[in-house]
Image: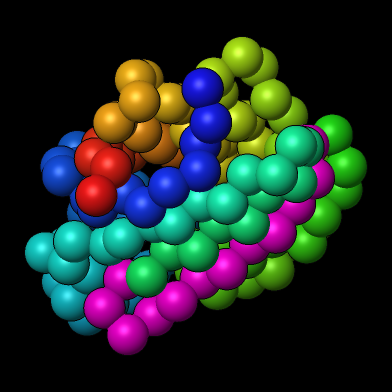
């Protein structure tokens, strides 16, 4: 299955505790918790471009599976990391945050981010 497509956020769990844990200010957490972000994924072989639009904020990351890339985190920080592919999962570790994006079926993508013992889960549906 290909990750390519546009996905709208359907539901999320543990948004506030996770965002607090990674140091996002309370005002941004309150602003962001009800915004339904849209993720657009372009997959071309092992190369990916991921664009996440949350309100007026647009985050764009490009990477190639298995190669070091500079990725922007949720807090806007740029870090070097290597994205690995394991079947229908993309895995990356960004500054202590473990992120797994899984293509559950042709219409659903689940992104799970873990920091410390806090698991933040986002479920998005293809639009």
Seen from the viewer's position, the closer of residues 46 and 27 is 46
Residue in the picture at 43% in, 47% down = 5
Q: 45 above or below 18?
A: above
| Residue 54 visible | yes
Image position of 25 (left or right of 50): left
Give how far across and how far down residue 98 sits, in percent: 56, 35
User: Residue extending furthest top?
Assistant: 87
Residue in the picture at 51% in, 71% down = 59
User: Residue extending furthest left?
Assistant: 34
Residue in the picture at 60% in, 30% down = 90
Seen from the viewer's position, the closer of residues 74 and 67 is 67
Q: Is residue 2 magenta?
A: no
Q: 121 above or below 104?
A: below
Give how far across and how far down residue 58 sits, in percent: 45, 76
Image position of 72 (left or right of 102): right
How does the figure colour the protein chain or chains?
Answer: rainbow
| Residue 95 visible | no
Q: 8 above or below 29?
A: above
Residue in the picture at 24% in, 40% down = 125
Seen from the viewer's position, the closer of residues 104 and 1 is 1
Q: What residue range appears in magenta?
A: 54-65
Give how far across and how far down residue 115 sits, in percent: 47, 39
User: Residue extending furthest right?
Assistant: 67
**Which SS does the magenta portion mostly show?**
strand
Seen from the viewer's position, the closer of residues 26 and 13 is 13
The number of discs equals 0
Q: 79 above or below 87?
A: below
């Amino acid at each position: 299955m290909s990750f390519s497509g546009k996905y709208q956020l359907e539901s999320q769990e543990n948004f506030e505790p996770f965002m607090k844990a990674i140091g996002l200010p309370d005002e941004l957490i309150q602003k962001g918790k009800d915004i339904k972000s849209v993720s657009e994924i372009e997959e071309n072989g092992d190369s990916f471009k991921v664009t996440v639009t949350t309100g007026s904020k647009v985050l764009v990351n490009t990477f190639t599976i298995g190669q070091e890339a500079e990725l922007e985190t949720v807090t806007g920080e740029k870090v070097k990391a290597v994205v690995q592919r394991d079947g229908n999962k993309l895995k990356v570790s960004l500054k202590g945050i473990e992120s797994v994006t899984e293509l559950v079926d042709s219409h659903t993508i689940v992104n799970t981010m873990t920091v410390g013992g806090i698991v933040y889960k986002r479920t998005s549906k293809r639009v």
